[in-house]
Image (cartoon, rainbow, N blue to C red):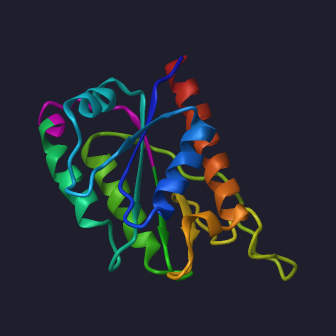
Amino acid sequence: MAKLVVVYHSGYGHTKRMAEVVAEGAAATLVAIDAEGNLSDAHWELLHAADAIIMGSPTYMGSVSWQFKKFADASSKPWFGQQWKDKIFAGFTNSATMNGDKLSTLHYLFTLAMQHGGIWVGTGIMPSNKKSAQRNDLNYVGSFSGAMAQSPSDSSPAEMLQGDLDTAKLFGQRVAEVTARFKS
């Protein structure tokens, strides 16, 4: 069975909730980057042993959080030894506004994955972009590169829209399916 890990940072809880749903869809282990941008040695070992690494960060000021960036910089140790080469990678993000420059965050995650010699998986979910579309539809935010969610700045994680969470779950399932294909 493939081993999948969701590594994420969450500042206000929205990205954590999204990470939990992605992990549920992927049957993955959750690894939280702490408030100082650190992981335990045991968490690094989980990442080294994983077949797939799904990365998540809120979008702050058009990119990943500084805590996630610290993790990314620390990943230069496995990069140097090419420990993560040919792993499956994917990513997700959340921000308060509909656009919020979330694509910049996904590009950052994609670039990190490519630097590690990884294989990127997008959502594979068609956008909900017809006149009849409702905000709670699957992939309403319209991302192919990775899962995106939008949470108003004055909302709690419990108020995240079910459509964004359903998109995240399907995204996790897709990453697990692609990983299983590569493992066989």
The percent position of residue 82, horizontal first and vertical second, equals 20, 32
Question: Which contiguous range is marked in magenta?
Answer: 78-90
Left or right: 102 in relation to 147: left
The percent position of residue 166, horizontal first and vertical second, equals 70, 54
Residue at 54 percent of width and 41 percent of height? 23
Left or right: 154 in relation to 169: left
The quadrant in which residue 52 appears is top left
Residue at 80 percent of width and 76 percent of height? 134
Based on the picture, tell me whether residue 43 belongs to the magenta stretch. Answer: no
Q: Is residue 72 visible?
A: yes
The percent position of residue 68, horizontal first and vertical second, equals 28, 57
Name the one closer to the observer, 73 or 150.
150
Based on the picture, tell me whether residue 80 belongs to the magenta stretch. Answer: yes
Residue at 60 percent of width and 39 percent of height? 24
Q: Name the quarter where the N terminus is drawn.
A: top right
175 up-or-down from 13: above or below: above
75 up-or-down from 57: above or below: above
Q: Name the quarter where the C terminus is drawn.
A: top right
The percent position of residue 90, horizontal first and vertical second, equals 46, 47
Q: Is residue 160 visible?
A: no
